[in-house]
Image (tube, rainbow, N blue to C red):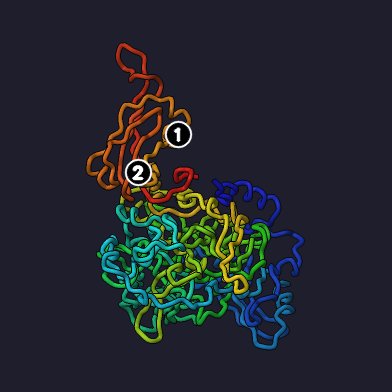
């Protein structure tokens, strides 16, 4: 299994300690020149703002150059933050300098850097939206049959079109060459255990989410102090006025501008499930007000680029207002950074904001830090985009409904995990979710992209935390990230060939070799049910339906499992019926013998003797009786390694 980032954290940290300035401890090189304080270039930067980090916190900062006063403002409003926190938290040392048009920003940066109070000067970079060109089709064009809809676990109208949740290889019951059974996040079995919890808040740092969409409204985070307060007043004193559903950092206003992309992302995470309309969200609840909540942190307007300043402010806002997961579909320009050390070496405001979220976004009693999830990028490039590729962030690549990598996805070192992002071969291969329409009050669209893959991981993370709340489990941030990145199955085995674009000369669809994706898409593709089982601490056994299986128990009883003495396999008639098992499973030659005729999940327990052929404790010397409970997961198609990497 390759969980590249998490397994190398200690080594990377040691390397940084030895080779870079430690901004956290404020150790600044004694001979630092003004040029050394400038941490990036004017390329792809706005010419109207400079971002400045001071050596120490101050509530006032004024700057005069050539007799002119520069407009200086704190980058992050203090609000009701205690003074001790203001002095200890690095983010409050950042200031924004507004410049008049016509000033030479590079020359001015050098002058600002000469001030002894200044630690770093940063040009305010543009960051790109990751949306594929928004040409998706409107959902509902393809009407599902009642028979298929009746088989769905919830009554949402378009749930049967969300193959990315549970893919049986068909489109409305007809076998599809574009769809492979199991190419999904295995969500339906997970919903049997948990559907969400409204205490879990996910911030969508994207275009503005349509908060009054009938399939999202009940699951939107609402700032009650502002909702019940006076317009134009910062009722909760958090530094933002009228931030009822979140904040528009692009316009510096509480007025959210509805956006297709952000609304589509939000629906995948937590559209209201089982409400009789539209789509279901991964952590959208059961229709009883129990879905995870979406906080909209708008950084884009109309698909235009945004700034480092806006995004950093949005990340901090999310942490300060209760979000514990952030979903990010934005990036630095392709190729801007090619290593973690180059990204981190100057401790930019964005790096400080991400560190702040990791440390300060908490869900008390469940997780002690925030989870940052990023799309890998849509450049079909062998380097994932930054900051997603940075080792402490979860970077998500994309696959389509037949397990092959999305033709657009970035990949390579720095990518952590793969999730459904859709493909462009037809409407049925894209991701169906909520959207915005100019013609009607609400809408649903099919789209593709790593922007669609990332919210699948965010939704699974939200579902996992919801289940932890339900069963009383608690994790550190690092522990929960490890659970996410190990709740996967092998994606590499499917990266052999892909059907290419139609060739008019030959009149055929040629095949394209895609073996270069192997080992480049992350640890594997995410499984929502497996994540919940790992949160619970229950092992899973994966079975392909329709044929007798002989399953090794090495993963569960150790590498010597075949030499153990097994006492029994217990599985109730009710549990057997769930999987269409007609003959009670047994152990033969140390392997589980089982045949499932139906897809689904069920519980069984297996008891073995460890340390002998009989149980000790009487006149004899013997072994210890060990019983393990398992979740049996039966599907039409499973990974060749039995579901484990």
Of 579 and 134, the residue lying toward us: 579
Find residue 387 and report its horizontal and vertical position in percent.
Answer: 58, 63
Can you say whether 225 is above or below 1 in the image? below
Gap between marks 1 and 2, in whole Å? 15 Å
> At 60% from the left edge and 62% from the top edge, which residue is drawn?
512
Q: Secondary structure at mark 1?
A: helix
Q: Along the horizontal axis of the image, is 536 left or right of 494? A: left
> At 67% from the left edge and 71% from the top edge, which residue is drawn?
121
Of 430 and 583, the residue lying toward us: 583
Find residue 289 and report its horizontal and vertical position in percent.
Answer: 27, 65
Q: Which residue is mark 2?
A: 632
Mark 2 Cα-neighbour bin, 10 Å: few <14, some 14–19, many ≥20: many
Q: Which residue is mark 1?
A: 554
Q: Is residue 66 visible?
A: yes
Q: Residue furthest front?
A: 506
Mark 1 Cα-neighbour bin, 10 Å: few <14, some 14–19, many ≥20: few
> Could you say which disc has been placed on residue 477 in the image?
none
Task: Please report whichever mark, 1 or 2, sits nearer to the chain's N-terminal start.
Answer: 1
Q: Along the horizontal axis of the image, is 496 left or right of 588? A: right
Q: Secondary structure at mark 2?
A: strand
Can you say whether 242 is above or below 502 in the image? below
Can you say whether 253 is above or below 568 in the image? below
Of 339 and 524, the residue lying toward us: 524
Q: Are marks 1 and 2 in contact (CB under 8 Å)?
A: no
> At 56% from the left edge and 48% from the top edge, which residue is drawn?
2
Find residue 80 and report its horizontal and vertical position in percent.
Answer: 43, 69
Using the rendered view, name the quadrant where residue 459 is placed. Answer: bottom left
Q: Is residue 80 visible?
A: no
């Amino acid at each position: 299994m390759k969980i590249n980032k998490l397994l190398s954290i200690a080594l990377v940290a040691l390397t940084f300690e030895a080779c870079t300035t430690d901004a956290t401890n404020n150790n600044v090189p004694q001979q630092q020149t003004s040029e050394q304080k400038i941490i990036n270039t004017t390329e792809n930067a706005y010419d109207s703002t400079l971002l400045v980090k001071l050596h120490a916190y101050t509530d006032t900062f004024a700057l005069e150059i050539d007799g002119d006063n520069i407009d200086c403002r704190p980058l992050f409003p203090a609000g009701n933050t205690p003074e001790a926190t203001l002095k200890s938290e690095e983010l409050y040392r950042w200031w924004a300098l507004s410049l008049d048009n016509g000033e030479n920003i590079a020359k001015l940066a050098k002058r600002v850097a000469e001030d002894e109070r200044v630690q770093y000067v940063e040009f305010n970079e543009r960051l790109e939206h990751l949306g594929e060109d928004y040409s998706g089709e409107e959902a509902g064009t393809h009407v599902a049959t009642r028979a298929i809809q009746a088989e769905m676990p919830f009554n949402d109208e378009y749930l049967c079109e969300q193959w990315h949740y549970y893919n049986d290889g068909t489109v409305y019951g007809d076998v599809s060459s574009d769809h492979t059974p199991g190419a999904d996040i295995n969500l339906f079995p997970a919903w049997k255990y948990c559907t969400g919890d409204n205490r879990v808040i996910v911030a969508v740092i994207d275009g503005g989410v349509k908060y009054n969409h009938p399939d999202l409204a009940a699951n939107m985070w609402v700032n009650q102090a502002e909702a019940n307060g006076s317009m134009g007043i910062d009722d909760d004193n958090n530094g933002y006025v009228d931030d009822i559903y979140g904040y528009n950092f692009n316009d510096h206003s509480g007025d959210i501008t509805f956006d297709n992309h952000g609304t589509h992302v939000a629906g995948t995470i937590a559209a209201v499930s089982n409400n009789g309309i539209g789509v279901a969200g991964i952590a959208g609840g059961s229709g009883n007000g129990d879905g995870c909540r979406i906080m909209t942190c708008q950084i884009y307007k109309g698909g235009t680029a945004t700034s480092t300043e806006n995004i950093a402010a949005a990340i901090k806002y999310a942490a300060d207002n209760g979000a514990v997961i952030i979903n990010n579909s934005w990036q630095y320009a392709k190729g801007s950074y090619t290593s973690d050390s180059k990204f981190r070496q100057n401790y930019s405001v964005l790096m400080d904001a991400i560190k702040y979220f990791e440390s300060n976004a908490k869900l008390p009693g469940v997780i002690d830090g925030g989870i940052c999830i990023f799309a890998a990028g849509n450049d079909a490039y062998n380097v994932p985009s930054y900051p997603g590729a940075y080792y402490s962030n979860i970077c998500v690549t994309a696959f389509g409904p037949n397990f092959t990598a999305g033709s657009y996805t970035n990949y390579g070192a720095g990518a952590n995990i793969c999730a459904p992002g859709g493909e462009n071969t037809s409407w049925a291969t894209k991701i169906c979710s909520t959207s915005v329409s100019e013609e009607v009050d609400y809408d649903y669209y099919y789209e593709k992209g790593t922007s669609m893959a990332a919210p699948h991981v965010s939704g699974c993370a939200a579902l996992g935390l919801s289940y932890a709340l339900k069963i009383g489990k608690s994790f550190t941030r690092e522990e929960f990230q490890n659970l996410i990145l190990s709740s996967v199955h092998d994606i590499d085995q499917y990266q052999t060939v892909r059907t290419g674009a139609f060739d008019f000369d030959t009149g055929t669809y040629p095949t394209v070799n895609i073996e270069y994706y192997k080992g480049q898409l992350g640890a594997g593709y995410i499984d929502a049910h497996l994540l919940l089982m790992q949160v619970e601490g229950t092992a899973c056994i994966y079975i392909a339906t329709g044929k007798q299986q002989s399953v090794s128990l090495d993963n569960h009883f150790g590498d010597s499992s075949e030499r153990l003495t097994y006492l029994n396999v217990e599985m109730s008639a009710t549990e057997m019926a769930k999987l269409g098992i007609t003959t009670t499973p047994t152990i033969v030659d140390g392997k589980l013998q089982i045949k499932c005729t139906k897809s689904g999940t069920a519980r069984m327990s297996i008891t073995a003797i460890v340390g002998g052929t009989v149980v000790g404790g009487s006149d004899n010397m013997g072994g210890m009786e060990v019983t393990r409970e398992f979740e049996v997961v039966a599907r039409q198609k499973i990974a060749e390694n039995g579901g484990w990497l």
